[in-house]
Image (tube, rainbow, N blue to C red):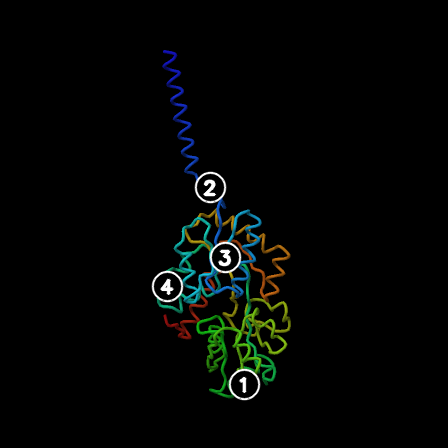
Amino acid sequence: MTISRTRRACALAALAWLAAAAALAQAPAPYPSQPIKFVVPYPAGGATDTLARTVAQKLGEAWGQPVVVENKAGASGTIGNNFVAKAPGDGYTVLVAITALIQQPSLLEKLPYDALKDFAAVTLIARSPSMLAVPLDSPAKNLKDFVALVKANPGKYSFGSYGAGTSSHIQGALLNQQAGLDLTHVPFNGAAPLLTNLVGGQLPAAFVDSASSRPHLKSIRPLAVTGTQRMHGLPEVPTFKELGYHSFDPYGWFGLFLPASAPAPVVNKLSEEVNRILRLPEVTAKIEALGLQVGGGKPDEVQKLLHSDAAIYAKIIKDANIKLAQ
């Protein structure tokens, strides 16, 4: 009887051990336990790519896991965006996106993902205000002068942007709406040719972002800036809000996102670490050297901002009837 009981106890103990071992085998490994991929939906060499590589390097050093940057460019960023939207929500595929992510749903008839539902916001890496600028020889010394000049010369003035459907195009359309102007939109293929024509005086005005305009500030005249505060490097230039205009508050941004299925603990852990990285003096200096403002923010704060900004852009785009061909 004693032997039988002993055997039964041993058998039960063995079963318990096997069950515990099976449970441990099925338990997910602590995050991160494998390489992480940053997906940049634009070509290498631009500001998005530079910011991604800056954060990726520091994240890899901190976590002891390789963090690789993969450029999946094409279709105005939607190819890379869609790749991450459809990726497993395990925290190992991260999207490095820009403001266009929440503008495109209002510009394009069909997208293979929902920008506000298929991604989990992690944090913002950087923010970028924009400005309305004119050539140095323009008779307009401020925004009031510029509005009066355009109204006094109907059909003769235009504004440039770095492409149809971009933030600069949307901002120009918003100025037309609110100031009652008839500025003709002139899209360029990127910021470089736009600024070349603005500095050279071939273009009477343009909306340009802070990073692109930084090397040219002595060759152009900023009249007003977007955002909620004056730019650090241009304290004398007022915001559009100060001048009585509305809906110019949103900043351009560069942010990190995971697939929406990513668990909250993974999203929060990545957010906390990247926010720590952004506060490192060498990272802050690198971001500011690009003419950008250091980002940051908790996931819920960023998600709330995205919804707010998306609604503002959607109204402007609808009222201005801006559409992009697919």
What amino acid is labelled 1 in the image? Leu
Which of the 4 quarters of the picture holds residue 102? bottom left
Q: Which label lies toward us, 3 or 2?
A: 3
Q: Reading the chain from its start, which is encountered first: label 1 or label 2?
A: 2
- Viewer-nearest of labels 4 and 3? 3
CA–CA distance in space, label 3 to label 1: 47 Å
Q: Marks 4 and 1, how far apart in space?
A: 40 Å
Q: Residue at x 49, y 87 (%)?
A: 156
What is the number of the mark on residue 111? 4
Q: Secondary structure at mark 1?
A: helix
Amino acid, disc 3: Val
Residue at image position (42%, 27%) is 17
Which residue is situated farthest in the top direction here?
1
- Identified by mark 4, the residue type is Leu
Tag 3 secondary structure: strand
At label 2, which amino acid type do we have? Ala
Image position of 119 with respect to 223: above or below: above
Of the two numbered discs 3 and 1 in the rendering, the one whose residue sits closer to the viewer: 3
Q: Helix, strand or loop at disc 4? A: loop
Q: How far across and down, in percent of the image, does residue 70 sit?
A: 47, 58
Of the 4 image quadrants, the one containing the N terminus is top left
Q: Which mark is residue 149?
A: 1
Q: Which residue does the numbered mark 2 point to in the structure image? A: 29
Q: Earlier in the sequence, mark 3 or mark 1?
A: 3
Mark found first going from the N terminus, 4 or 3: 3
Query: Does residue 58 lie above or below 126 as drawn?
Result: above
Picture layout, residue 79 above or below residue 209: above
State how many labels appear: 4
**How many residues crowd mark 4 within 10 Å: few (<14), some (14–19), many (20+)?**
few
Q: Which residue is mark 3?
A: 69
